[in-house]
Structure formats: structure tokens, C-alpha cells
Amino acid sequence: MITLLFFLRRIAFSLATLLIASIVVFTIIQILPGDPAELILGINAQEDTLAALREQMGLNAPIYSRYLSWISGVMVGDFGTSYTYSVPVAELILERLWISLPLAIMALCLSTLIAIPVGVLAASKHNKPTDVGIMGFTQLGIAIPNFWFAMLLVMVFSIKLRWMPAGGFAGWENGILGGFASLTLPAFALALPQASILARIMRSALLDVLQEDYMRTARAKGLPRNKVLWRHGVRNAFIPVLTILGLQFSFLIAGTIIIENIFYLPGLGRLIFQAISQRDLIVLQGLVLLLVASVIFINLLVDTAYAIVDPRIKRAFYE
């Protein structure tokens, strides 16, 4: 019962956060300069035509009425109609989501697969040449901008070696392997800085755990060093790592705005860039809310993982 109550409270808190975020997003978008009716009809349109279109689009209604109309539509999957493309925003988002979501998941998996073993190796070789070398490379990975690393990957693996495509998306309909090949270089470009951060967090957390009394007791009982390290140390060091993983997914989604434009990927990042440049505010509004909702959902998953990894956190929620 306590477990169910814990999840219900976290879900209620997430929904309340999403509601507040939707109000903030809608308000900010509405006060941005630019007239959607003028965007659709052009700057040379007659004033009476503009007024009629504003009335038809509901732009003359009070802001609270427009918000209620928009949020009620969002709740049933209706984000409005794009000013530029004249198609439902939900259709645009769904079409681009099948590129950005696999890209972000690939980048997150790559950063995790690289960072966890590297962080554990650095902690196990504390203050030795291996540890110093790993920390130097991770510092370099943090310092290098991902867009510069993306261009470097294109120059080496696409232009010089011709192993991978330099840009564009082959399309999932042409085969899964072709689609993943198009996303491989962008995923590595996104994963490198995040892997560097995660490896340093893993190392620091594990070093703290290795100093605990129960770790010394486990070693004194004669358990193999690797078993103590991975079975007892890594699991207890995973709480701060989970926090960074949750934050990283949000950064990866945001990072696609730059990476997708470098690799000409028709994903959500490129759609955001196009919506800003074309002042398609209704598309921008829906995309920003979607990104906020994804961050809130990931944080909910992280909180759930906290309770699974360390039950003390769940108990502390009720104290």
C-alpha cells in the first residue's frame, strides 16, 4: 500500500508540474511578437481579411479562453494546425518523433555503455596512470562541443573513410539497418560529452562508496575484489548516476536541435528550428510542451528507479 501511495503521489506531483508548465509555455508563446494571421496571409493582406482570419482562428478571444481551448485539445492529442504546413501539429510531431526518439535512445545507450565501465575502471585504479589518463580524456570530452565533434566525425568516417553516410536519413521503410546507419554518427556526436560527464560521476560516487564500512567488511570476509566492486559498490553508487541519466536524456533531446541540422535529419530538432525561423508559433508551442512533458516523465522514471535501487528514499518520502 505504501508503494502504491508513493507512485500515486509522484504521478500527481508530475501532473501538477506539467499543468503549470503548460500555462507558462502558452503565455510566453502568446506574448512573442508576430501575428499568425499575417504570417498565413502575408504582409500585404487587407486589414479586413486579417481581422476575419483572426476571428476564425480565435485570436480575438481572451487569453484564458484560448488556453483552455488549446489545453483541452492537447489532452485528446489535438495540438492545433500548423500555420506553415496546414497540417495537424500532432501529425508533424509523430512523423518526426520516429527519428529523434531513436536518436536520443541510441545516444543515451552509447553514453551509458561507455561511461559505466570507464568510470568503474577509473575508480578501481584510483590515482594510478589509468585513472589519470581516463580523467584527462573525459575532461577533453566535456570541453569539446558536440557540433564540432559531429563535423569531425563526418570528415573522418564519411568523407575520408566513406564508412558512414554524411547526412540525411535513409528512412525506416528502406530497412532498419539503413535507418540506424544514418543515426550512428549523430548518436556518437551526442553521446561523447554525456559519456564524459557520466564517467566522472560514476567514478566519484564509487570512490565514496568504496570508503564505506560495509565495503571493507565485504573485502575482509574474503570476497573477490571484482565481486565486491560490482555487486556491492556499483549498485550503491548508482543513485547519483541515475540522476545524471535522467538529466542527460533531456539534454540529448535538446541537443538534437543542433545535431539534426548538421546531419540534415528531419527530426524534432530540425522541426523546432524550422518553426522558429518561420514563426510557426503553434508548432513551437506544441513541441516545447512535448519536451517539457518528456523531462517530467523521465524524472518520474528516475524517482521510481530511486525507490527500487534504494528503498530508504521511498521511506524518506513519508517522513
Image (cartoon, rainbow, N blue to C red):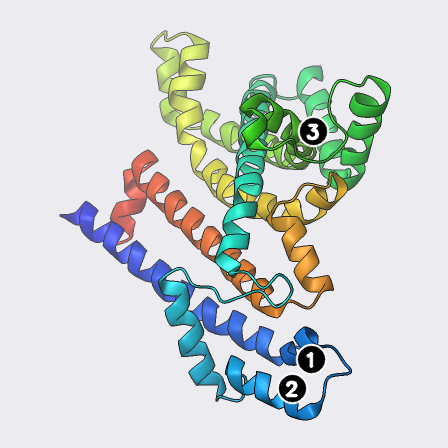
Residue 311 percent across, percent down from the top left: 28, 39
Residue 318 is tagged as none
Q: Quadrant of the C terminus?
A: bottom left
Q: Residues within 10 Å of mark 2 (few under 14, many from 20)?
A: many
Instruction: Say which residue appears at 53% left-offset and 87% top-offset.
Output: 55
Residue 50 is tagged as 2
Q: Which of the two labelled residues, at mark 3 and mark 2, occupies the earlier sequence position?
A: 2
Which of the 4 image quarters holds residue 307? top left
Secondary structure found at label 2: helix
Using the image as rendered, state which of residue 307 and residue 212 is in the foreground: 307
The disc labelled 2 sits on which kind of residue? Leu
Give how far apart the Cα atoms at labels 3 and 2 are: 46 Å
Q: Residues within 10 Å of mark 3 (few under 14, many from 20)?
A: many
Residue 185 is tagged as 3
Left or right: residue 179 compared with residue 133: left
Q: Which of the two labelled residues, at mark 1 and mark 2, occupies the earlier sequence position?
A: 1
> From what the image shows, is residue 208 above or below residue 5?
above
Image depth: mark 1 or mark 3 in front: 1
